[in-house]
Image (cartoon, helix red, strand yellow):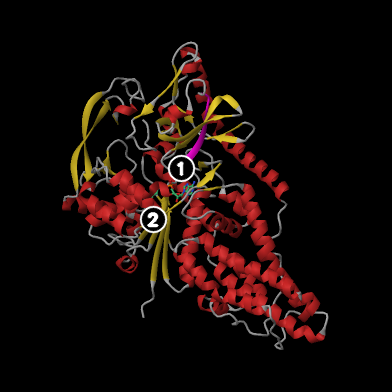
């Protein structure tokens, strides 16, 4: 019989900066799934990589004074770069694609041409405002006082030729795919795609650019570069040899369509609308599932490179081990939902589950085998009344775990295993082996108790392999089991260990951490890291700061200029006021709960003098969405944004900009 195959992918990450714990989260989840399928005997292909083209990278390289290729090479291949991080995290990818790889570039050109020849890509005109000296197109909303945001000179109406993909043609088929199949998971993400994007009408997509060079040229019209998302999405197929000679076609035949693409929820739109439409155009099979996982948040806000509020996976993995970090990420955060990251959660999880529950069970079991039997259990063993309940739990564990893994519910699969570990620790207390050891007559019972403990540990360890591969090898060594007892089949065969098993007392696999002390040290380390990063940027920053100070003097402090790039960092969005209350702690402030299109957030705003809660509830307002969250009222509240409000007269009136009700919450304001 043919071996069953499984093809799984991560997003290909932008090497615009070092990757952070959010990227690590998705890659670790993908790795756990790949290892789980390998454990089950599947022929697995696990793909990850980097998405290296686009204007942002071109600009970053310019800032750094290197070529875009040098810039991405350093982030991907350089010290503590992407590949180093995946090595540290023990990521078992089979293939790593870089979109600057020659074979990928050539394949994308062919794919683009094929869709063009079919008539699904056509040349049209992109209309906008043009700044002749800067040779740049701008949209109306990007202009500053009607002028070019870069140089401040007047702009003219202009048109430019661009290629468009007939996305509209596929709207019905894509809608059907989302609504009537389980293509997009979790199901909760389907509504947003259908109601916010498909139902209002899908417009054709502009798929070429002429405003920058760092991309894949359209080979039959080389002043255009291919839109970065077309370049990026087809990576999932070019890495299997589709339309190139780097890998054999047979890989494509064997592994395509993908079983699942794991991606973060912010790129669900690209993967569930644009990607299937392009595959339909190419007459290619569609991936079986796209799973949009939730975000790791820091102080309630999304961690992201552009905000700079990121957690360094290197520091944590080097300090606590890759396995501890892998376990924590997949145990604490339900995969489909957002979760707040904190160092305290990480340390508590290591202490509770890994040091106390798993570590103690192993060290107690091996220490008792060593102390009472010199390591090797006697075959003369006696069952007892406590055994049945434990063995039943262990016996059903694989099936429960499998159901959870198939639903990508890693947190539940791990909870299943740790429930059994907890049962085993309680079994020790109930059977009291130290009492059984006192009497020769109860030694057979003691031997059985230790055997059951070792067997429970073995089954749990088999199932923990996808999550903590290194640790599991250490546990297997202490349990003295050979490879035949590490398999998927053996996890359903309780009692597979030989009765005269030899256990080896070994090192403590997860020493307990002193939480209070560790949190202080960790904070100091993170602060030192930030300071070092700032110092590294300082020479470039100083002249900018001086220039800013000088221009502030000229035009008055309150109107200090910021660059267009700085302005682009500000994320302005429409939000719906879902609740609003006066605060007993302050007469000036209103407590608003607003929905930003993704989640609800709290904003405290000093407008209570002018507005009553009922003036605001249900209204669509503008907010600055990426302001660092600010603790207020001695940390009792954290305000996560600012609302647009205008000073209306000298003695301090105030008005608020309301958007029409039809504006969707989350819409970007330009
Ligand atoms: O979007 N929490 O690349 P990217 C959880 N190149 N996951 C997070 C996260 C967070 N705070 N931040 C990032 C791109 N991620 C494109 C993808 S695919 C054809 C092209 C993870 O570097 C999450 O999986 O911005 C998210 O989708 C991905 O990193 C985005 O990485």
Residue shown at 73%/73% (left/top)? 430
**Number of marks in the rendered image:** 2
Give the SS element for disc 2.
helix
Give residue 571's position: percent from left, percent from top: 43, 33
Q: Main secondary structure of the magenta part?
A: strand
Q: Earlier along the polypeptide chain: callout 2 or callout 1?
A: 2
Where residue 360 appears, as percent x and y from the top left, is 70, 66
Image height of 512 relative to 208, above or below: below
Is 592 drawn above or below residue 97 in the view shown?
above
Q: Which residue is at 59% across, 71% downward? A: 460
Residue closest to the eye, 611 or 554: 611
Say which residue label 2 marks: 187
Of 266 and 449, which appears nearest the observer?
449
Whether residue 137 sits left or right of residue 418 in the image: it is left
Chain part drawn in magenta? 600-606
Residue 598 locus on image (x, y percent): 43, 43
Secondary-structure class at tag 1? loop
Look at 29% across and 27% down and name the residue there.
140
CA separation in Å, label 2 and label 1? 17 Å
The image's mark for residue 286 is none
Q: Is residue 366 magenta?
A: no
Quadrant where the N terminus sits is bottom left
**Frontmost residue, 483 versus 614:** 614
Q: Is residue 148 above or below residue 555?
A: below
Judge from the rendering whether residue 140 lies leftward or rightward of residue 342; answer left or right. left
- The residue to which callout 1 is attached is 599
Q: Name, please, the residue furthest toward the bottom.
A: 380
The answer to whether any part of residue 18 appears in the image is: yes
Q: Quadrant of the C terminus?
A: top left
Q: Is the CB atom of the residue marked by disc 1 within 8 angstroms of ligand 1's nearest atom? A: no
Q: Is residue 539 left or right of residue 426?
A: left
């Amino acid at each position: 019989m043919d071996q069953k195959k499984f093809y799984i992918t991560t997003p290909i990450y932008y090497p615009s900066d070092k990757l952070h714990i959010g990227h690590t989260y998705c890659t670790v989840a993908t790795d756990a799934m790949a290892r789980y399928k390998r454990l089950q005997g599947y022929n697995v292909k696990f793909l990850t990589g980097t998405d290296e083209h686009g204007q942002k990278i071109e600009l970053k390289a310019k800032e750094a004074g290197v070529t875009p290729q040098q810039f991405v090479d350093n982030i991907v291949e350089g010290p503590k770069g992407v590949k180093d991080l995946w090595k540290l995290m023990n990521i078992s990818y089979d293939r790593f694609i870089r979109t600057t790889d020659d074979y990928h570039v050539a394949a994308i050109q062919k794919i683009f041409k094929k869709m063009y020849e079919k008539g699904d890509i056509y040349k049209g005109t992109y209309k906008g405002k043009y700044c002749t000296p800067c040779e740049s197109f701008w949209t109306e909303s990007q202009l500053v006082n009607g002028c070019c945001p870069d140089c401040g000179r007047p702009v003219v109406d202009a048109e430019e030729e661009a290629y468009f993909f007939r996305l509209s043609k596929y709207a019905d088929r894509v809608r059907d795919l989302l609504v009537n199949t389980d293509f997009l998971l979790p199901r909760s993400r389907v509504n947003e795609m259908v109601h916010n994007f498909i139902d209002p009408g899908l417009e054709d997509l502009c798929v070429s650019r002429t405003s920058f060079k760092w991309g894949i040229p359209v080979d039959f019209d080389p002043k255009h570069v291919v839109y970065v998302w077309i370049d990026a999405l087809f990576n999932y197929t070019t890495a299997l040899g589709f339309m190139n000679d780097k890998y054999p076609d047979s890989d494509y035949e064997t592994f395509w369509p993908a079983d699942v693409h794991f991606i973060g929820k912010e790129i669900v739109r690209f993967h569930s609308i644009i990607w299937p439409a392009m595959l339909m155009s190419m007459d290619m099979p569609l991936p079986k599932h796209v799973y949009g996982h939730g975000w790791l948040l820091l102080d309630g806000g999304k961690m992201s490179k552009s905000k700079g509020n990121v957690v360094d996976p290197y520091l944590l993995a080097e300090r606590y081990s890759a396995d501890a970090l892998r376990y924590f990420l997949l145990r604490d955060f339900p995969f489909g939902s957002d979760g707040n990251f904190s160092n305290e959660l990480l340390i508590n999880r290591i202490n509770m589950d890994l040091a106390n529950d798993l570590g103690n069970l192993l060290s107690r079991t091996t220490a008792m085998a060593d102390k009472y039997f010199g390591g090797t259990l006697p075959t003369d063993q006696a069952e007892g009344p406590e055994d049945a309940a434990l063995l039943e739990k262990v016996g059903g564990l694989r099936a429960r775990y499998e159901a959870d893994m198939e639903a990508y519910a890693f947190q539940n699969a791990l909870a299943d295993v740790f429930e059994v570990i907890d049962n085993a620790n309680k079994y020790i207390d109930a059977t009291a082996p130290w009492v059984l050891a006192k009497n020769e007559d109860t030694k057979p019972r003691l031997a059985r108790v230790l055997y059951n403990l070792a067997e429970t540990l073995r089954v749990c360890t088999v199932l923990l392999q996808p999550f903590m591969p290194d640790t599991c090898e250490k546990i297997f060594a202490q349990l003295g089991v050979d490879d035949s007892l590490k398999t998927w089949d053996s996890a359903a065969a309780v009692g597979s260990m030989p009765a005269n098993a030899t256990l080896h007392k070994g090192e403590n696999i997860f020493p307990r951490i002193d939480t209070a002390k560790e949190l202080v040290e960790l904070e100091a380390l993170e602060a030192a890291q930030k300071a070092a990063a700032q110092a590294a940027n300082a020479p470039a920053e100083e002249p900018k700061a001086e220039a800013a100070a000088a221009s502030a003097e000229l035009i008055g402090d309150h109107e200090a200029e910021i660059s267009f790039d700085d302005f682009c960092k500000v994320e302005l969005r429409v939000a719906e006021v879902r609740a609003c209350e006066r605060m007993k702690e302050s007469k000036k402030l209103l407590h608003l709960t607003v929905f930003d299109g993704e989640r609800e957030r709290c904003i405290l705003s000093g407008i209570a003098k002018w507005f009553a809660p009922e003036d605001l509830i249900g209204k669509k307002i503008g907010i600055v969405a990426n302001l660092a969250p600010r603790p207020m009222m001695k940390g009792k509240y954290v305000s996560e944004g600012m609302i647009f409000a205008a000073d209306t007269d000298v003695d301090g009136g105030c008005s608020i900009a309301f958007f029409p009700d039809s504006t969707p919450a989350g819409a970007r304001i330009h």
